[in-house]
């Protein structure tokens, strides 16, 4: 279920405070010296593409490497490439609470874009290059796919419709699943309460702790309809003026050798929407 943004940020804050204690015990010996055998590595690369409430588009590429014991590998002599672009190794970061390593291969300067074939390769310390796999990123999420209203009365049910959020070629879908590719799309809805300060800045408050104030449902291929019932608007959280809606599509490709089992390439496409709730 989706949580209000301020609660997510708070959870991430406490996770970051605990991260130094966790990661100091999770440093693989493969982080230094020669690594010439790809079967020693589990590589998980994610391409995330998000469209925010205001239409702003962002993209991140992140690759995490672990050894067979699940320990993090952060070897500066190992390269991760996406379509030939080398991602940079980030060995650590500093904040108010001190420095901590998070062993992440990331480079936000590499732009992939929607509906693009991405080939991922790994270069080991001896210069040998191995193909992790290739994935086709999902098409851009547009108003033709999903376009909720900007306002809605709390006195009425809300009907949401979508079209072609997932490909609906049955044969192609089954063939891709056989090849280890999966695609799951979810619709998530939550309530939030907006207040404005004297400078008209918006603050989000009043997140609910009750599961009844959250909606999560899986969306299939083709067209579809979901109706938020009137009972949802009646409670348990009654003081709210916004619905936050998330369309989240997670596409994942399992990687077969020469890397460790559990290696994957994935593409996450997210669309965030806001509906003002009126009386």
Image (cartoon, helix red, strand yellow):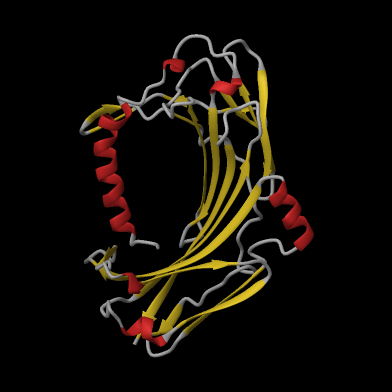
In this rendering, position of residue 189 left or right of residue 161: left
Query: Residue at 46% across / 16% down in the picture?
Result: 30
Q: Nearer the viewer, residue 131 or 138?
A: 131
Residue 164 against residue 114 in the figure, above or below? below
Q: Is residue 108 left or right of residue 243?
A: right
Quadrant where the N terminus lies? Answer: bottom left
At which x and y percent is residue 150? 47, 76
| 1 lies above or below 84 | below
Q: Which corner quadrant of the image does residue 119 belong to?
A: top right
- Tell me: 27 left or right of 119: left
Residue drawn at 33 percent across, 62 percent down: 4
Residue 145, located in which quarter of the rendered image? Answer: bottom right
Asked if residue 119 can be seen in this view, the reply is no
- Locate residue 106 relative to residue 224 in the image: left or right: left
Q: Residue at x 45, y 86 (%)?
A: 157
Q: Position of residue 234 (x, y in %)?
A: 32, 85
Residue at 30% from the left image edge and 25% from the top image edge: 24
Q: Residue farthest to the right?
A: 171
Observer-nearest of 133 and 138: 133
């Amino acid at each position: 279920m989706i949580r209000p943004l301020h609660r997510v940020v708070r959870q991430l804050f406490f996770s970051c405070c605990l991260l130094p204690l966790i990661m100091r015990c999770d440093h693989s010996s493969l982080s230094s010296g020669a690594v010439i055998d790809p079967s020693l590595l589990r590589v998980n690369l994610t391409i995330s593409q998000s469209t925010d409430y205001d239409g702003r588009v962002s993209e991140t590429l992140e690759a995490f490497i672990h050894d067979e014991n699940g320990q993090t590998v952060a070897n500066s002599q190992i390269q991760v490439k996406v379509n030939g672009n080398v991602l940079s190794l980030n060995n650590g970061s500093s904040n108010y609470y001190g420095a901590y390593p998070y062993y992440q291969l990331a480079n936000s300067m590499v732009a992939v874009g929607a509906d693009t074939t991405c080939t991922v390769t790994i270069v080991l310390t001896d210069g040998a290059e191995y193909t992790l796999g290739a994935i086709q990123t999902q098409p851009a999420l547009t108003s033709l796919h999903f376009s909720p209203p900007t306002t809605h009365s709390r006195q009425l049910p809300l009907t949401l419709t979508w079209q072609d959020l997932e490909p609906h070629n049955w044969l192609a879908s089954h063939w891709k699943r056989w090849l280890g590719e999966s695609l799951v799309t979810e619709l998530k809805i939550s309530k939030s309460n907006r207040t404005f300060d004297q400078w008209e800045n918006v603050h989000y408050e009043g997140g609910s702790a009750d599961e009844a104030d959250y909606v999560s449902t899986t969306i299939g291929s083709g067209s579809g309809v979901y109706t938020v019932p009137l009972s949802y608007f009646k409670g348990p959280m009654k003081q709210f003026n916004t619905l936050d809606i998330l369309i989240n599509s997670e596409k994942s490709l399992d990687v077969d050798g020469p890397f460790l089992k559990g290696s994957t390439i994935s593409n996450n496409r997210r669309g965030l929407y806001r509906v003002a709730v009126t009386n």
